[in-house]
Amino acid sequence: MTEQSAPTAQLEQTAEVAPARRSTVRWVLLAIGLVAAIALPWFVYPPVAMDIAAWALFAISVDLLLGYTGLLSFGHAAFWGSSAYVTGLIAIHVGVPFPVAILGGMLFAMLIAVPIGYLSVRRTGIYFAMVTLAFAQMIYFVANQWHSLTGGENGLQGIPRSFFGIEQVETDAFYFYYAAVGLILLGAWAAWRILHSPFGRVLVAIRDNPARARALGYDVERYKVVVFVLSAGLAGLAGGVFSISHGFASLQELAWTTSGKVVLMTVLGGIGTLWGGPVGAALVVLLEDKLATIGFDGIGIITGSIFIVIVLLFRRGLWGTARTVLQGLADRRHRAPRD
């Protein structure tokens, strides 16, 4: 029996080490993300930090569809905005602590996502995007016309931050951030668990080759509906936190521009990366806040220009490109011959 050659033994050793290394990196990134979320209001104005967290989860919900299932939704503002309104209505008229109100808004978003998803997933590509956009515009129209409930163009104002009678959380944006960011982290953890489960692997298979997934016995349409509803729930959770943070819900939360904005964030960070959404959200929110602070009116021009540059130079997005480069360097280092 001949001994293995040095290159063959090295390749086998690398194959054994790679999964362990990926697992270690995964947990390190989770720890870094948790530390960043906790430290954020110390370096950024707390209301802006809360906006970053809410939009980050919203972008994650879109990436769950776009990056891992291959479904581009142009109507996700329907879930973000409808949850914002329902959360506000529950907080105003029922007077429960805001986490309960947000849970109610999230459940409502998931409820309306069932028929929308069932009808939308029967289409693919741009047709799926247009169907979701059409449903979102219908909800926008209902909210605009139902003045007695939603306030119409004036929006739903005076949403309270009731939190078990703790005055500091209810009145101070800094303490409110720490009371609310736990919900955001819980949503992000749920997305992470979904993607690193057998269900998540089926989603990737459907994205890559739906015909093959169907041939293997998976009910592709049912999986798409389920992930659509889960994505809507995460978007609803983010929208509820956003409305409580700002104390109002407006038609802007349901507008098609909001759907476009979150898709922009997802693409900027890198689709199919999970971490790309928060990176893109932080970039866009901080940029908009900075431009608004200096009184610049053409915010859309600047963000659009940055979007074009990043798409042209970093086709995988900021986080996606960085991850690819780092993985390449790590693989090259482990493949390098050793004495």
Image (cartoon, helix red, strand yellow):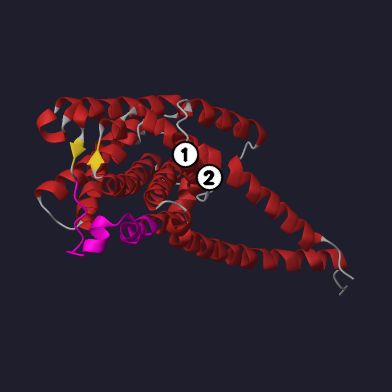
Element type at mark 2 = loop
Q: Is residue 215 left or right of residue 242?
A: right
* Lower sequence index among marks 2 and 1: 1
Query: Hey, which residue is sitting farthest front in the picture?
Result: 294
Q: Could you say which is closer to the camera, residue 210 or residue 339?
A: 339
Q: Is residue 273 visible?
A: yes
- Whether residue 19 is in magenta: the answer is no
**Residue 105 as seen in the image, left or right of residue 9:** left
Q: Position of residue 29 (x, y in %)?
A: 55, 61
The residue segment tinted magenta is 159-186
- What residue do we see at 31% from left, 40% from top? 80
Q: Which residue is mark 2?
A: 272
Q: Residue at x 51, y 62 (%)?
A: 30
SS under mark 1: helix
Q: What x and y, as percent, mark residue 140?
A: 25, 28
Q: Does the magenta portion include 168?
A: yes
Tell me the CA gap for discs 2 and 1.
7 Å
Quadrant of residue 295 within the rendered picture = top left
Residue kind at label 1, given as amino acid type: Leu
Are discs 2 and 1 less than 8 Å apart at CB?
yes
Name the residue located 35 percent from the left edge and 36 percent from the top edge: 76
Q: Is 178 left, or right, of 273 in this rendering?
A: left
